[in-house]
Amino acid sequence: MSSLPMSPMMGQMMSQPLLISNILEFAARHYGSSEIVSRRVEGDMHRYTYRECHQRARRLANALHGLGVRMGDRVATLAWNGYRHLEAYYAVSGSGAVLHTINPRLHPEQVAYIMNHAEDQYLLFDLTFLPVAEAIAAHCKTTKGFILMCDRERMPAESKIPNLLCYEDLINSHSDDYAWPQFDENSAATLCYTSGTTGNPKGALYSHRSTVLHAYGSAMPNALNVSSRDTVMPVVPMFHVNAWGLPYSVPLSGAKLVFPGAALDGKSVYELFENEGVTFSAGVPTVWLGLINYATQNQLKFSTFRRTVIGGSACPPAMMNTLIDDFGVEVVHAWGMTEMSPLGTTCTLMAKHLELDREGQRKILQKQGHAVYGVDMKIVDDDGKELPWDGVGYGHLLVRGPWIIAKYYKDEGGDVLQDGWFPTGDVATIDPDGYMQITDRSKDVIKSGGEWIGTIDLENIAMAHPAVLQAACIGVAHPKWDERPLLVVVLRAGQQVSREELLRFFDGKIAKWWLPDDVVFTDALPVGGTGKIQKNKLRDQYKEHKLPTV
Ligand code: AMP
């Protein structure tokens, strides 16, 4: 891949390619007895060890080979977080094929679109998604077979899918006598499409090298801090940017792994945490909202849950405070994106911050944080000129590194880099200590009288009000200022606050001209397939909203 000069004096260490198969091989050999526990869509719990997972992954690799899957072929999954999905992660990539994880929350038409775009040869899917598979089967032009991830007894007696195969039959009819092939670490390993809020989704194609480096980097203490003493439950789905790399970084650390399946409501997550002794988890803010509500309403505490990573969208400070102060759970705010494998920054304190009081520390912890080693970042103005790291001036955030996209799959979107840097589409500040803070997505930022208003700040303030459950701020057309902020609010059950009272709550917390012009109350905010609030939908919904004239 590289055309860099070679030194006349080369190092004399073994040259072993960084391959995904090696992670599971390592876990099975060195932490063979560590458990993997899954809540199955069949309704029961399943438990086994890394050793058994490795065995079944090799059987699956043999089965896929038998079905004609070869290096570089794409094999898709439509599945929850569970042990069979993990086996597919390793069997597909490990054998040199490319694992294409599909977000089942997409519309079936979109699922068929990306399967055709990816030219998937097979689809492995959970029982839950049988109706989706049936709806798309006739439209998937390249797909030779559909593999239902269940045992023979649960296979449907009849199906509209002509080439329907049973996963457990495949596993049972193949041996685990399989040696993981060795190949160039820059080979493609997994494919994940962006959520595609505008236009069709685009594919990020990760390599073995980028995935293994990301797993190393993200397991470090300043990042996810995973160790063999942890019990880790990835709530973030394996169909969204490889569950933030946890299916790789957890086995690499030898930790116990717990998969929640389809049950992501507060009660189910709480019970699984308690039953399995989960110490660490990761997910988007909307999931934690459900868990906190359930625990609060039922006056419950966590007995083992100590640390969580929150990212995917900004962690509201009120949520961080509740988790730390009321539940004793350490919160690590993280930022990244599909194009970044996904981890870019994580927020943990430096030694000098330990002397700060609670408020001082919280102010830092609420930022998106420090670059993880491997990621470099900078902020630039509209002309591409780099801006200082003063924690005040904000600009377009650009990143680069070995697990950051160089181009989209099949060159969609053409040349995406700017002088070797990837433009994230986020707007941010970076402070003198290197802590980055996102102020907005560039397409969500409100342009008022030629100046920018960041919506995350406004939402965080609104959500700190005790009556507010969720808040989203959007720009609405204004005859004089181009755009002005409109705050859309969901109240907590049984709570009330008036428009005026809520606007008064912003007093002294922001510059006066940032104050939202109006507040609307609604029952729910539109949430997309990856748990993020869909501001484009809100903008459509409120585009005719008449702001009060002052
Ligand atoms: P996706 O590729 O779907 O994971 O979306 C990536 C985008 O989510 C980023 O570019 C950000 O706009 C947003 N995002 C992710 N993490 C955070 C965070 N901690 N705070 C604010 N925005 C975030």
Image: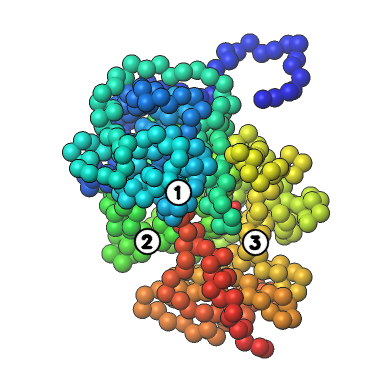
Q: Quadrant of the C terminus?
A: bottom right
Residue displayed at 63% across by 10% down: 12
Circles 1, 3 touching at the beta carbon (< 8 Å) = no
Residue in the image at 50% along x and 17% along y: 182
Quadrant that contains the N terminus: top right
Q: Is residue 433 visible?
A: no
Q: Which mark is residue 290?
A: 2
Disc 2 residue type?
Gly
Where's residue 11, x and y in %? 66, 13
Q: Give the image quarter of residue 150.
A: top left
Left or right of residue 152, residue 336 in this image: right
Which residue has dot 3 on it? 443
Residue 53 vs 465, above or below: the answer is above
Which label sits in the foreground, 1 or 3? Answer: 1
Q: Quadrant of residue 30?
A: top left
**Of residues 528 and 397, which is closer to you in this image?**
528
As measured in the structure, the alpha-carbon distance from the residue carrying label 2 to the one carrying label 1 is 28 Å
Q: Is residue 176 above or below residue 208?
A: above
Q: Earlier in the sequence, mark 2 or mark 1?
A: 1
Whole-percent x, y for residue 21 in the image: 45, 25
Distance, label 3 to label 2, CA atoms, is 28 Å
The residue located at (55%, 35%) in the rendering is 206
**What element does badge 1 sit on?**
helix
Q: Nearer the viewer, residue 251 or 228?
A: 251
Query: What element does badge 3 sit on?
Result: loop
Q: Residue at x 28, y 27 (%)?
A: 171
Judge from the rendering whether residue 190 lies leftward or rightward of residue 298; answer left or right: right
Secondary structure under the numbered disc 2 in the rendered image = helix
Q: Which residue is mark 1?
A: 111
Q: How many marks?
A: 3
Location of residue 320 in the rendering, given as x and y in whole percent from the top left corner: 48, 59
